[in-house]
Image (cartoon, coloured by chain):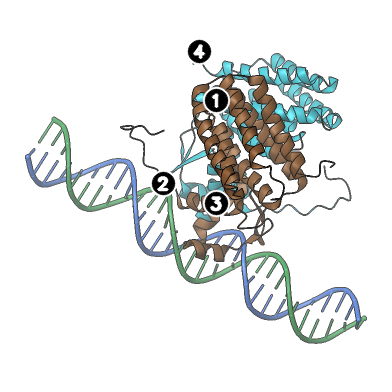
Chain colours: A cyan, B brown, C blue, D green
DNA sequence: GCCGCGCCGATTGTTGACAATCATACGAGC
DNA sequence: GCTCGTATGATTGTCAACAATCGGCGCGGC
């Protein structure tokens, strides 16, 4: 990204942004279980900041939909119902399908390179048989996929959806595909991009999402 | 929505939420032109609140992507480049196309009823020849469309994108379709849903977005 | 004349304290 | 014994003051 000699403006993110990132990560990994109340005083003490910046950070997560606020009562981590799981994966399908189409009609070469690297990481994680590492690599892959679309709005939306995806997985950790299967599905995606087979790619990403829904929620409902 | 006898929890929105809604609306209608700095002291005085709640509200809009923050310098309304216009409409395409598919495989009847009403409003706005009213009705139509999908995440994302859409239109007000054309396009969408012709519906929503891009940005770039 | 340096007003970032509201526990009354 | 009313503790919502940083202006030096 940042080539040598390419002087970029120094990254100066606000305190609220930093705290929001930490909280987001904590929610994602299940440190705060769904439904948990986030007490302001305690959190502020942990981050060693005042309640002001902390509240600003939490408002960001409320806007993102990760926290639900009840006035005069506090902020709570959302809990995901079966219908939420469907919503999340269908929204991901919307985002990632369009990302795929943009990649196909855009800079396909770069996408293949970046996704191949993400795939390697996924393979390595699969061999380690570490569920968490696999999820990390899985998430990184899809983040890269959307990033390759070059559409910042899709990217932003995908980030939130991937956090929610991770919350689903943390809650229903038993339902997760075998490493081989996981790798195979993602390799197929890269291959389809590499081959320029858009029809196949769309079909793959659709089944990828729809099967995930069936795996995570009672298929009957 | 709220049937008689259906006792829902009373709506108690936070101050930050209220302020955020007002600011969002102001940005949408161009009250704050793109690039404008939002001074905290002045705004806080206008809303008759302290800077605390105001800052919380603004952090929401930053997360939403409507405001861009430069540390120790202030918050500014984003300005939309040509590439942003493309991004917004392509993201809308992602959201609305999936919404269409969900409607077709879901509660199509309700969608037709609600969209027919939205279409009536659009027709009325078209007859009034009031650009602003037309945009309002246009926006409401698409909001309804996504709402009919029943997917809260798609709904949330669409809201932000529609605000940005409105910003585009405010900036390039000359490029807006004739009332008849606008109504016709939307009527075709409703008809396709009513007829159950998914192929046609998807095709319509795609051209609806892609043509908008061509209309708003130099087609060459 | 031009460049670098330091001061100054203004704005943002942060904090601690105060007011308002809610949940819980306890006791009076029926 | 159960219900309602009340007191209390804790938490959230809000505010005004303080600290830190930035942009602009004027001065001195080269």
Nearest the viewer among C3 and A44 is C3
**Residue picked out by circle 3:** A56
Real-space Cα separation, disc 3 to disc 2, in angstroms: 15 Å
Alpha carbons under labels 4 and 3: distance apart: 41 Å
Query: Marks 3 and 1: in contact by CB < 8 Å?
Result: no
Q: Which residue lies at the image location 55% right of the left edge and 54% below the top edge?
A: B23
Q: Which residue is mark 4?
A: A220
Quadrant including the N terminus of chain B = top left
Q: Which residue is mark 1?
A: A85
Q: Residue at x 62, y 16 (%)?
A: A211
Question: Could you tell whether A199 is left or right of B22 in the image?
Answer: right
Percent x, y for residue B132?
59, 49
Q: Is residue A89 visible?
A: no
Label 3's element? helix
Left or right, B159 with reference to A76:
right
Q: Using the rendered image of the protein, determine whether residue B18 is visible from the camera's viewpoint.
A: yes
Q: Are marks 4 and 3 in contact (CB under 8 Å)?
A: no
User: Which circle's residue, 1 or 2, is located before the other in the chain?
Assistant: 2
- Which sits earlier in the primary sequence, circle 3 or circle 2? 3
Is the residue under label 2 in contact with that under label 1 (CB below 8 Å)?
no
Residue A113, by quadrant, is top right
In whole angstroms, how far apart are the C-alphas of marks 1 and 4?
Answer: 14 Å
Q: Are marks 3 and 2 in contact (CB under 8 Å)?
A: no
**Which subunit holds the residue at mark 2?**
A
Q: What separation in Å lies between label 1 and label 2 (alpha carbons)? A: 26 Å
Q: What label does residue A71 carry, if any?
A: 2
Q: Secondary structure at mark 1?
A: helix
Precedes in sequence: disc 4 or disc 3: 3
Quarter occupied by residue B91: top right
Residue at position x 70%, y 25% from top?
A: B203
């Amino acid at each position: 990204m940042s080539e040598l000699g390419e002087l970029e403006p120094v990254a100066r993110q606000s305190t609220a942004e930093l705290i929001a990132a930490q909280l987001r990560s904590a929610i994602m990994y299940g440190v705060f279980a769904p439904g948990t109340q986030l007490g302001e005083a305690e959190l502020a003490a942990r981050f060693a900041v005042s309640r002001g910046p902390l509240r600003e950070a939490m408002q960001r997560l409320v806007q993102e939909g990760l926290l639900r606020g009840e006035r005069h009562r506090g902020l709570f981590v959302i809990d995901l119902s079966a219908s939420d799981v469907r919503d999340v994966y269908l929204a991901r399908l919307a985002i990632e399908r369009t990302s795929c189409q943009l990649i196909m009609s855009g800079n396909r070469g770069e996408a293949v390179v970046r996704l191949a690297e993400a795939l390697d990481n996924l393979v390595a994680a699969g061999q380690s048989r570490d569920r968490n590492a696999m999820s990390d690599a899985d998430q990184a892959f899809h983040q890269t996929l959307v990033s390759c679309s070059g559409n910042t709005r899709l990217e932003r939306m995908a980030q939130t959806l991937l956090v929610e995806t991770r919350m689903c997985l943390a809650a229903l950790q038993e339902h997760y595909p075998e490493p081989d299967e996981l790798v195979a599905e993602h390799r197929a995606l890269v291959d389809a991009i590499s081959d320029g087979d858009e029809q196949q790619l769309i079909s793959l990403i659709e089944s990828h999402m729809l099967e995930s829904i069936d795996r995570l929620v009672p298929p009957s409902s």
